[in-house]
Amino acid sequence: MSGEFNSRSLAPRILLAIAALMSFRTFEYFPGMQYIQEAWVGLSLAAIVFVYPTWKIASGLRFTSFEIYVLFLTLLDLLLPAWAAAREFGQPLLYGLLTQRHVLLIATPLLLFLAIRSRLLTPRDIEVVLLWLAWGTWLLYTLMRLLLNPENFESTGVGFVSGVNGKPSFVLSSYFITFGLLYYALLGIRRRRSKYYIAAAVLLVGVIGSADARSFLVCVAGILLYFVYRWRSVGQFIAGVGKACAVAVVVLGLVYVVNPVFLSERVGLFSDAFRVVLTGTAGEDYAANARLFEVATALPYIQKHPLLGNGEISHQWQGGAQDVLGSYFYAGDVGIIGALFSVGAIGLLIFAYQYRFALWAARRLPEAGRNQLSDGVFGFLLYSALISLPQALCVFDPEVTLFFIAIAVGPACEGIRVRRSVMQSATAIAPSTIRPEQSGSGGHDE
């Protein structure tokens, strides 16, 4: 986070930090934050209705494929689940629309994309803000776990405190910490500096105690192995994996000496989770068992409406999903199965298409143009794609994935636009020497 302090960049950085925190719903379930979060949703609606059109008119009403997709996805996410729930369960459309109001938070990645292309925000601004948020949330969560007792906040609701195998713990959003962890780990792999690995390990502590730590660890381990394989020779890859395994054994040994009960519980959770997944039978892990029962609840509805799903049931209508379906059910708990339940196969494919833009940006970013920010962004996007299998992040929290896709696509779109202008000028000078397929018109731009 080194770099000269520029007072002129402070205001946009603070604004971006606030927008990211609110749009990621980082503190939505904290005591007293519900009304502030709802007010931000209202501001997001105003941004889509007034700010975005005004900005586009001023810039000449030229739309990129990414913008068209985001606007279409906003309408789809607002209308499809509301309509599907009304069709299947008789839920009034108004309840469905209000349940999906969080989709309006997509306003932040949409405006972020324009700010990047207009050069109101630089890559350095974005990098600094994301690291601020990574370390800031890590520090806050660490202090909360050290100084506060979750049992004293159980009345706040399961969104803030939830029981993990009978033990209450804070439910904390770790998106920024995850970005920071991948940022430093990939920087360490590129530069081979121990200090970056240490920073990544410190940030890992902020996530490891959460309820979804198992899927998180599997996804992060897979991502790091993938990049080591890409950036190292086969021999270096094998040696690196060997060193990582040796370090893991040492760390696990130290943890066992300090707190053997904690290690035994964590190993048991992994074992129960794999048993449930592989055998389909309940184990001793309450969370894994609950997901097994939720899948059983969802499957008949998926078979009934496989293409467009069954929508989202409002907590304010008929007692919520638990009463309407006759059992506990939360679509986000069961990942792809929950996505198929809510938006169907067609909806899932439309949501998944957002990664097409990320792949396009990655292919068009030359190796010489890659840096720690682009590595961190693409690392997080790969993480979001993997974690979407058990959690459907790209469907139930598209504002998060689209935020990072906007960072990846924004500079790439600008680069394509500049190259296209150069090629068009060259074509005007010597049209016979340039073939049509060389003009770059196949990209996702104007």
Image (cartoon, rainbow, N blue to C red):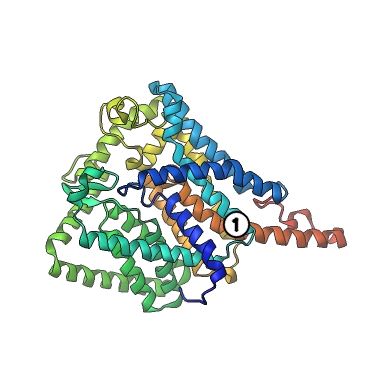
Q: Mark 1 falls on what kind of element?
A: helix
Quadrant location of residue 1? Answer: bottom left
Residue at left 41%, top 38%? 339
Residue 26: give x, y in percent of width and height.
Answer: 38, 52
Compared across the picture, whether 434 is left or right of 105 comes to right
Q: Could you tell me which residue is drawn at 19 percent across and 43 percent down?
A: 286
Q: Nearer the viewer, residue 308 or 208?
A: 208
Q: Position of residue 201 (x, y in %)?
A: 32, 69
User: Can you say whether 432 is above or below 163 in the image?
Assistant: below
Residue 200 at x, y percent in the picture: 35, 69
* Total number of numbered discs in the rendering: 1
> Residue at label 1?
115
Q: Residues within 10 Å of mark 1 (few under 14, many from 20)?
A: some
Amino acid found under the numbered disc labelled 1? Ala
Which residue does the image show at 37% across and 37% down from the upper left?
Answer: 338
**Is 191 situated above or below 382?**
below
Q: Residue at x 58, y 54 (%)?
A: 113
Asked whether residue 224 appears in the rendered view, the answer is no
Where does residue 174 sit, x and y in percent of width and height? 35, 56
On the question of residue 436 being in view, the answer is yes
* Left or right, residue 206 beside residue 52: left
Q: Nearer the viewer, residue 322 or 18?
A: 18
95 vs 376, nearest the viewer: 95
